[in-house]
Image (cartoon, rainbow, N blue to C red):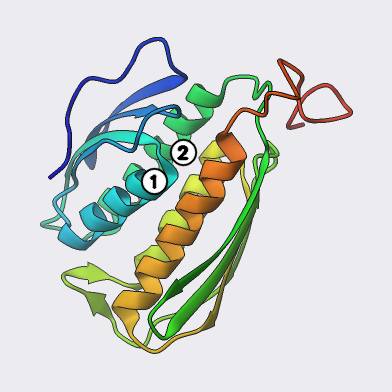
Amino acid sequence: MADTRALNPASRTGSITRDTAETKISISVNLDGPGHYEVSTGIGFLDLMVEQFSKHSLIDVLMKVEGDLHVDQHHTTEDSAIALGQALAQALGDKAGIGRYGHAYSPMDETLSRVALDISGRPYFVWKAGFTQEKLGEWDTELIEHWFHSVAQTCGLTLHMELLYGVNNHHICESLYKGFARAMRSAVERDPRKGSAIPSTKGQLGG
């Protein structure tokens, strides 16, 4: 069961609210948490994947989404990812002292995924994965790629995701999310050898 204790205000945190005719969203993150989460998007499988992201990245995530699910799931999926990326970017600030790069091989039974990322401030997304089912639970699988793309764009990630092999669609999706989580965990963690230095010879990330 998720622990819903308040985020530590002394940690690197970000909070975003987004209110449009399509979605109403409130998201808070804590980069230095133990992976506490409270997630409600109205899409059960998306909830589970965001919870997996939080648990395995050790990034606390409080996410409440009310979307126009009577239309379809596109706006809820896209806008939740946009707001999550914005909250992560806010929490990262100038990115001083972070590891910056992260990668993970993520096995789940017969499935193996590879994720590599750079918190570069220059969004770029490579996706080499796919699904043989149209839905996981009630969630349209075509929206999974779009979710990752939207997070990469608003967080400023260079993000490469690849399914090396796999059969079970549930395993494939979960493997990708857990790989993303583990890569983010490495990338956002502070490196004590760097102190407050920006991890770039330019003196800044992005641009």
Relative to 146, does residue 171 appear above or below in the rendering?
Answer: below
- Amino acid of disc 1: Ala
What's the residue at 58%, 43% (across, down)?
186
**Residue 15: x, y in percent?**
36, 22
* Mark 2, secondary structure of its residue: helix
Marks 2 and 1 in Cβ contact (< 8 Å): yes
| Mark 2 → mark 1, Cα distance in angstroms | 6 Å
**Looking at the image, which is closer to me, 193 or 78?**
193
Furthest residue toward top: 10
- Amino acid of disc 2: Gly
Q: Quadrant of residue 22?
A: top left
> Would residue 203 appear left or right of 107 to someone viewing this image?
right
**Residue 52: x, y in percent?**
32, 53
What's the residue at 48%, 46% (across, down)?
151
Relative to 165, does residue 71 appear above or below in the rendering?
Answer: above
Q: Quadrant of residue 59?
A: top left
The reply to whether residue 135 is visible in this rendering is: yes
Task: Point out which mark residue 140 bears.
Answer: none
What's the residue at 70%, 41% (across, down)?
122
Q: Quadrant of the C terminus?
A: top right
Tell me if mark 2 has few (under 14), some (14-19) or many (20+) residues whose alpha carbon lies within 10 angstroms of its own. Answer: many
* Mark 1, secondary structure of its residue: helix
**Residue 159: x, y in percent?**
61, 55
Residue placed under numbered mark 2 in the picture: 85
> Would residue 70 appear left or right of 145 to someone viewing this image?
left
Residue placed under numbered mark 1 in the picture: 81
What's the residue at 42%, 59% (across, down)?
178
Question: How many callouts does the rendering have?
Answer: 2
